[in-house]
Amino acid sequence: MSKRILLSVCCCVLVACGDSPESTVPLYKVEQKGFAVLIPATGEVEAAQAQRINSPGRRPMTIDWLAEENSWVTKGQVVARFDSEQLLLDSREEELEMMQLDMDMRKQNASENQQQNELNSEKVLVGKEFKFVDTFAIDDLRLYSKIEIIDTLSNRDYLGAKEEFIEWKESSIGDRNQSALEVLDIRKDGHQAKFQQHQSALAQLEVIAPYDGMLVYEKNWRGEKASIGQTVYPGSTIAKIPNLDKMQAKLFVLDKNAIDLKVGQKVNLSLDAYPDENLTGEVLSVSGFSRTIKRGNPTKYFELVVSLDGNSKTLQPGAKVSASISVADSKEKLTIPIQAIFNEKSENYVYLKDGRKFERRAVKIAGKNLYFVEVVDGLDAGDVIALSVPEETEGGSYE
């Protein structure tokens, strides 16, 4: 299609130049012609529905093994395996931390028991001292002097206070021990949770196919497919198992070529491997912004998803396609090459040939494709225009 348009332009230019052999300016004769806006695109076939295979765990992991791309896998088959070395080290570290905390708890309980035994011994001693004091606590001045009786009563008050202190100390030791054990228990729960996370991640190191299908590697944001030794983040899609019953195409359009792309526009496609097999489809979605699709390549593209009519056996995930998107249907319109349009202060104009001279003529344009633009005011069929700026003469005209 692009070659036919270029050939048409060249023919018109040659004919126009032949009409005025003395002019060195390339010319174009304005005419009514079929005008369609077709945007070229490239891409590949993919399944409309696919089961994603994601990286497990909660931390970056390294791919240790992958099933061969485009191989047929069965339900329950291992399709990917991740490196376990770091997880095993982390898991063992948490396990050692829990063992240390268990030891600290035993030490804390042993310390409490020792202090309790010491307090029990003191309580027994105080009890014996009470009995001894009570033996001589006889309020009889005939047997003891008044001073002796007062000393005995004072000793009893002292022992009562000492007994109360021991009871307080006993209660305090219990409270402090309980608080210390609760802190140790909280720390242990934290390490236990991390240990269980690591154990869960270890159990997920082997990714299983959820059902039968063809395994297709997924590209990341840098345009790279998953590979052995690659580090991937949690939840990243490394592969897909597509449902081959319904296929679609993912297309990419150069940023500068993305003119009026919309959902619902018709698309013609051909497989690069089978160029004679024509496919049709419809735009399902258009990305809201352009982006790079290859690492190190700054070129930006808009991404489109296109439905595919029919279900050809040649449609396989990953098959490369070339396409043209019909932005505007082909109709007879007054068109001129894009290079004939000039712009100054937001005004579009052309150089219209008038005999041996040119005049600057303002024009109003509408739709355009990659090569032509539709003119809706300012020109008529049969007019001849310049495809480059003609030289200006002393009188202000051009020739």
Image: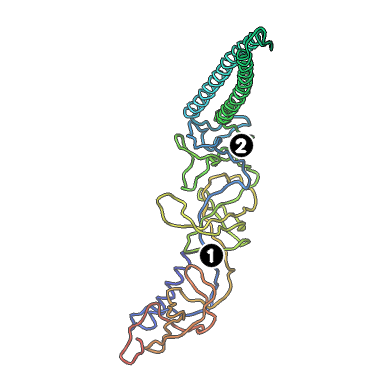
Q: Secondary structure at mark 2?
A: strand
Between the C-alphas of marks 2 and 1, the distance is 36 Å
Please indicate whether residue 339 sits to the left or right of residue 39 in the image: left
Query: What residue type is disc 1 on?
Result: Leu
> Is 179 situated above or below 114?
below
Please report whichever mark, 2 or 1, sits nearer to the chain's N-terminal start: 1
* On-image quarter of the C terminus: bottom left
Please provide percent x and percent y for residue 283. Answer: 60, 58
Please provide percent x and percent y for residue 203. Answer: 58, 28
The residue furthest right is 139
Query: What residue type is disc 2 on?
Result: Gly
Q: Is residue 201 visible?
A: no
Front in this rendered view, residue 134 or 78: 134
Pointer 2 with pointer 1, Cβ within 8 A? no
Q: Is residue 318 visible?
A: yes
Residue ID at (36%, 89%): 397
Front in this rendered view, residue 109 or 272: 109
Q: Report the residue marked by disc 2.
A: 213
Please provide percent x and percent y for residue 16. Answer: 41, 79
Front in this rendered view, residue 189 or 29: 189
Front in this rendered view, residue 116 or 335: 116
Residue ID at (43%, 78%): 343
Residue 79 image label: none
How is the protein colored in the picture? rainbow
Q: Report the residue marked by disc 1.
A: 38
- Nearer to us of marks 2 and 1 is 2
> Is 270 situated above or below 210?
below
> Is 291 situated above or below 230?
below
> Is 167 situated above or below 358?
above
